[in-house]
Amino acid sequence: MTIKAVVLDIGSVLEVIDDDVFPGPAEQRLGLATGSIAGGLAGLPGDAMTGQVTEAAIRAEWQRTLGLTDAQVDELVEDYWRWYVGTLDEELYAWFVAQRRHRMTAILSNSGPGARERERPYGFEDVTDLIVYSHEVGLAKPDPAVYELTTGRLGVEPGEVLFLDDVAVNVAAAAAHGWHAVLHVDTTTSIRELDRVIREHA
């Protein structure tokens, strides 16, 4: 089958994420033990990635469990988002945008509340036919249902989808659904592999 849609992940794929930005530096600045920031959300009554809690609830839980002032938790949230959105992989983004001349482009991202708004400056909505954020649809990779939902919204067959993700289990789940799935290693390697799949299914 011809590739009719290219679907990319965002974090650590279209966006380069630097783990030196968060949470370590924030914990050091606030005088917290290593792991405190992640552990501070353990009591949330649901999974943010599937939309069960709000951004405001996350902020409030951090403030409560870590004993932060309003100013401190505001700074923590901004540190988190600065890490979350990373920096744009310009080369991969340019390749992705160029695909739209020939086929549909889409994003499938495991995300948290607020992601769409925070990532909007990168212009993803302007260069895609579809964006599926897990927190908006209540489904997250590698749940087979999220690949089925994305395929259906694109209006294509599974064998007409080419997918790039940096998490092996997500790639395996996409392949099990019938997508052509590539594990992201680095930009040059991924573009070469994506182009190869497209050529083989021309």
Image (cartoon, helix red, strand yellow):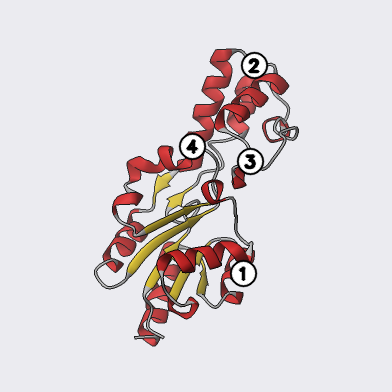
Q: Which residue in the structure is indicated by mark 3?
A: 52
Q: What secondary structure is found at the residue carrying circle 2?
A: loop
Q: Quick check: 178 above or below 186?
A: below
Q: Where, by quadrant of the figure, is residue 119 drawn? A: top left
Q: Where, by quadrant of the figure, is residue 36 drawn? A: top right
Q: Is residue 168 left or right of residue 162?
A: right
10 Å crowding of disc 4: few (<14), some (14-19), many (20+): some
In the rendered image, residue 34, in percent from the top left (x then y), is placed at 71, 32
Say which mark, if any, is on residue 114: 4
Q: Which residue is at a point 56% across and 25% down the rendered structure image?
A: 76
Q: Can I make out residue 37 in this image?
A: yes
Identity of the amino acid at label 3? Gln
Q: Which residue in the structure is indicated by mark 1?
A: 173
Identity of the amino acid at label 2? Leu
State the CA–CA distance, disc 1 to disc 4: 26 Å
Q: Which residue in the structure is indicated by mark 2?
A: 68
Decide: marks 1, 2 in contact (CB < 8 A)? no
Q: What secondary structure is found at the residue carrying circle 4?
A: loop
State the CA–CA distance, disc 4 to disc 3: 13 Å
In the rendered image, residue 176, in percent from the top left (x then y), is placed at 61, 76
